Image: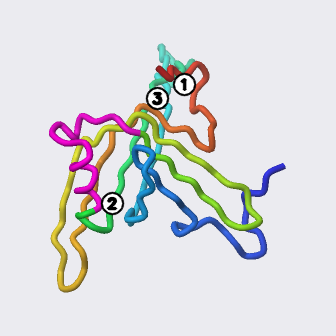
Amino acid sequence: MAVFTVINGKAYSHSSCEIRIDDVPTPFIKEIKYSDTLEPGEVRGTSAQLLSRTRGDYKAEASITFSSRGAAEEYREKWGDGWMEKVFDVTVTMKEDDMSTIIDTIVKCRAKKSETGSSQGADPNEESWELHPMYILKNGWSPIVGLVKG
């Protein structure tokens, strides 16, 4: 069995991550968040009790914060006009010595919102992207049976 829990006081942290956008290593990621939900529909009748449920609708969400506006700008320069229509994957690889590697893939993303903040003092200007992914593979595991990968 793989070892994913705390081993000898070690746990995965942000510095354990290699983040790749469009298969390019991107060390200037200050924060990455991603989540997915499978919200079942409810079958109700004359009873106050839930009678049954449907499989539900799957939805994935993600966001990234670049620690420097320049790091985000490199992708705009690479992708050009229409950069928010570009479809790309984000891969998060977590590694620590003596621990199993975890690879999450945020699949077929588009940037749906870009927010640039100014800094105070000597701090760098950051840029955040809210992403619109199709689905998320958590360590290769599909969130639903029959996932359409096309």
Per the rendering, the mark at residue 65 is 2
- Chief secondary structure of the magenta portion: helix
The amino acid on which the numbered mark 1 sits, given as a three-letter code, is Gln
112 versus 40 height, above or below:
below
Instruction: Give 122 or 63, whichever is nearer the viewer.
Output: 122
Look at mark 3 in the image and give the residue it sits on.
58
Instruction: Give 43 or 81, whichever is nearer the viewer.
Output: 81
Q: CA distance from mark 1 to mark 2?
A: 43 Å
Per the rendering, the mark at residue 118 is none
Q: Which secondary structure, mark 1?
A: loop
The amino acid on which the numbered mark 2 sits, given as a three-letter code, is Thr
Which x, y percent locates residue 9?
Answer: 73, 76
Q: Residue at x 28, y 50 (%)?
A: 75
Whichever of callouts 3 and 2 sits on the residue coming sooner in the sequence is 3
The residue positioned farthest toward the front in the image shown: 78
Which mark is in front, 3 or 1? 3
Q: CA distance from mark 3 to mark 2?
A: 24 Å
Per the rendering, the mark at residue 49 is 1
Is residue 85 found inside the magenta-colored segment of the image?
Answer: yes
Is residue 82 found inside the magenta-colored segment of the image?
Answer: yes
The amino acid on which the numbered mark 3 sits, given as a three-letter code, is Tyr
Magenta region: which residues?
Answer: 71-88
**Circle 1 crowding by C-alpha within 10 Å: few under 14, some 14–19, many from 20:** few
Which x, y percent locates residue 124?
Answer: 24, 75
Q: CA distance from mark 3 to mark 1?
A: 24 Å
**Circle 3 crowding by C-alpha within 10 Å: few under 14, some 14–19, many from 20:** some
Whichever of callouts 3 and 1 sits on the residue coming sooner in the sequence is 1
118 versus 148 height, above or below:
below
Whichever of callouts 1 and 2 sits on the residue coming sooner in the sequence is 1
